[in-house]
Image (cartoon, rainbow, N blue to C red):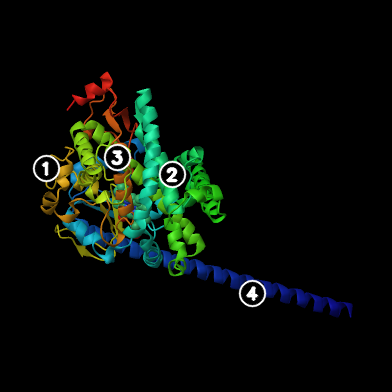
């Protein structure tokens, strides 16, 4: 019995061992098969990638551009610090424009500057998808219209566009006028102190206040610290985008998240979300004190009031869009206003002419309120804004994916898979379309002179299906604010500042800005100018 039990036990053990071997063998075989499959997939992917890259190289061979290394492309020569980034771009432009190509690893970037090529690309729904580099900008702009593609973009644009129609927007003019009066208070203090001020700081606060009220129905005019913090957050987020472009290894999300910059960016994002949530909640809770002052329906209220529009997006999507709209709207109008005031300070003749137009339209009373009825008559004011955006297009470059092989009107072939980058900053300073391009001359936008140029020689708001959805909003805001403040104040260069347009040191983040800020002096009209202000009048 014992011997039999032993034999039986032995057999069982042997069988178990055998079973374990079979299972282990099967697992090993499965692992080997999986590894083999991965290898085959990897090899075939690499092969497809290599074939595609070879093909793109063949098609792009005739195009000018810096010589690219086999695997890295032009990465080594493009590596630079953040403060030299713009110089690097302009050096490339001056060497290779109008059309050229550079390579980041196996990916070609084709830079175009010919307005006829712009029409071909921006005018066509086939090129609707933003370059796959745009998600980088999500750190600054959230997941909104600017960075979305495909079906979500179409659905969001359909939901949002009606709330930015002219008949809705005119309700904002009264808000813009009130905010312009707040800017006047700030300018009045600056005039009394006779100090040089960075006008962007004022414009940032007032524009943030304006967009929060008109887009979200939140009156934050008495919450200066919160407004200031939000401006700082959006500025930091925008900076983080260029940091990553200048250090390409940080483009890898998981690696970036581990760095101090990545952790700061994540905290910034959380704080921005909390700010927007707070603003929306404040409105929902019906904060009586603030709500009482809000007489018109905001963009968000207008959209959510219509069931058809509201249902096009989820609550989360509306929140993201609200954030993206506030960020896109605030930074752009604040910078445009600051550039315009600086350029007017540098060009006293244009400033006088603008003021004469304001007197013609509003009469001599500097306190007469701006309403939507005067805005269409502010033609010179409008030309000043457009000429400001010609010299300083706030989005100096924008990109699209190239979904198919294309022959551009300028004669260049671009293969499927390339990234197409348009560069209005260059086009809008091209003497072919704008003789003496660095001269500030608002009359370039007189209708008869516009007719003589290709339509997209000016494209500061982009064009076609993906053009700026906030263009009308921006123009109304800028005209209302300029018409309010320029009837009471004059702006002057900082003492000793003799820089021309070409000398202004550009700083590039998500939008174009100036290194060192927008330094001007302000005086109240009717006050005798200080000696420094009188001196600046004679520079030109
Ligand atoms: C002077 C002021 C402004 C300028 C120069 C400007 C310029 C632009 C440009 C060039 C684009 C296209 C960007 C690209 O293709 O990558 C754009 C898109 C956009 N802008 Fe503006 N913008 C201004 C003001 C505003 C305002 C006030 C708002 C919101 C109220 C706004 C919201 C948007 C949105 C949501 C998009 C994305 C549209 C889409 O892709 O469907 N912008 N803007």
**Residue under circle 3?**
86
What kind of element bears circle 1? loop
Label of residue 459 in the image: none
The CA distance from mark 1 to mark 4 is 82 Å
Q: In this rendering, would 1 be left or right of 312?
A: right
In the depicted view, which residue is nearer to us: 295 or 282? Answer: 295
| N-term mark: 2 or 4 | 4
**Residue under circle 1?**
435
Front position among marks 4 and 3? 3
Q: Pointer 4 and pointer 3: residues touching (CB < 8 Å)?
A: no
| N-term mark: 3 or 2 | 3
Front position among marks 3 and 1? 1
Badge 3 density bin: few <14, some 14–19, many ≥20, Cα 10 Å = some
Q: Report x, y in % for residue 392.
A: 26, 42
Q: Report x, y in % for residue 17.
A: 71, 72
Front position among marks 2 and 4? 2
| N-term mark: 1 or 4 | 4
- Whether label 1 lies within 8 Å of ligand 1 gets the answer no
């Amino acid at each position: 019995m014992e011997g039999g039990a032993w034999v039986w036990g032995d057999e069982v053990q042997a069988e178990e061992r055998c079973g374990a071997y079979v299972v282990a063998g099967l697992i090993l075989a499965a692992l080997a098969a999986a590894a083999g499959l991965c290898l085959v997939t990897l090899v075939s992917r690499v092969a497809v990638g290599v074939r595609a890259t070879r093909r793109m190289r063949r098609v792009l061979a005739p195009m000018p551009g810096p010589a690219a290394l086999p695997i890295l492309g032009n990465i080594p020569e493009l590596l630079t610090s953040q403060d030299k980034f713009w110089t690097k771009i302009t050096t490339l432009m001056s060497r290779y424009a109008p059309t050229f190509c550079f390579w980041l690893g196996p990916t070609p970037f084709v830079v175009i500057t010919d307005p006829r090529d712009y029409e071909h690309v921006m005018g066509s729904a086939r090129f609707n998808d933003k370059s796959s580099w745009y998600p980088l900008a999500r750190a600054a702009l959230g997941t909104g219209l600017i960075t979305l593609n495909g079906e979500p973009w179409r659905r969001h644009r359909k939901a949002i566009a009606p709330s930015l129609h002219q008949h809705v927007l005119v309700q904002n003019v009264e808000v813009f006028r009130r905010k312009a009066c707040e800017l006047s208070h700030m300018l009045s203090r600056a005039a009394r102190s006779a100090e040089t001020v960075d006008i962007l700081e004022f414009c940032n606060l007032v524009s943030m206040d304006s967009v929060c009220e008109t887009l979200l129905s939140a009156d934050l005019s008495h919450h200066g610290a919160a407004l200031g913090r939000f401006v700082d957050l959006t500025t930091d987020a925008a900076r983080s985008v260029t940091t990553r472009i200048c250090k390409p290894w940080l483009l890898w999300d998981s690696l970036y998240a581990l760095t101090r910059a990545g952790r700061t960016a994540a905290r910034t994002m959380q704080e921005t979300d909390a700010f927007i949530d707070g603003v929306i909640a404040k409105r929902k809770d019906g904060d009586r004190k603030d709500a009482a002052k809000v007489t018109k329906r905001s963009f968000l209220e207008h959209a959510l009031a219509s069931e058809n529009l509201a249902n096009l997006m989820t609550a989360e999507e509306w929140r993201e869009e609200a954030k993206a709209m506030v960020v896109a709207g605030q930074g752009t109008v604040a910078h445009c206003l600051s550039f315009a005031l600086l350029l007017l300070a540098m060009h006293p003749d244009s400033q006088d002419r603008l003021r004469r137009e304001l007197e013609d339209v509003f009469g001599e009373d500097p306190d007469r309120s701006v309403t939507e009825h005067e805005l269409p008559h502010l033609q010179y004011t409008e030309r000043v804004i457009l000429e400001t955006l010609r010299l300083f297009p706030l989005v100096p470059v924008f990109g699209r994916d190239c979904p198919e092989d294309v022959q551009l009107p300028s004669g260049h072939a671009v293969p499927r898979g390339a990234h197409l980058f348009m560069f209005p900053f260059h086009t809008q300073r091209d003497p072919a379309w704008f003789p003496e391009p660095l001269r500030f001359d608002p009359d370039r936008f007189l209708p008869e002179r516009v007719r003589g140029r290709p339509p997209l020689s000016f494209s500061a708001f982009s064009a076609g299906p993906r053009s700026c959805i906030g263009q009308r909003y921006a123009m109304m805001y800028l005209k209302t604010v300029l018409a309010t403040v320029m009837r009471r104040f004059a702006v002057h260069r900082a003492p000793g500042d003799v820089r021309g347009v070409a000398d202004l040191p550009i700083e590039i983040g998500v939008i174009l800005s100036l290194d060192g800020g927008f330094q001007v002096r302000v005086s109240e009209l009717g006050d005798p100018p200080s000696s420094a202000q009188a001196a600046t009048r004679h520079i030109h």
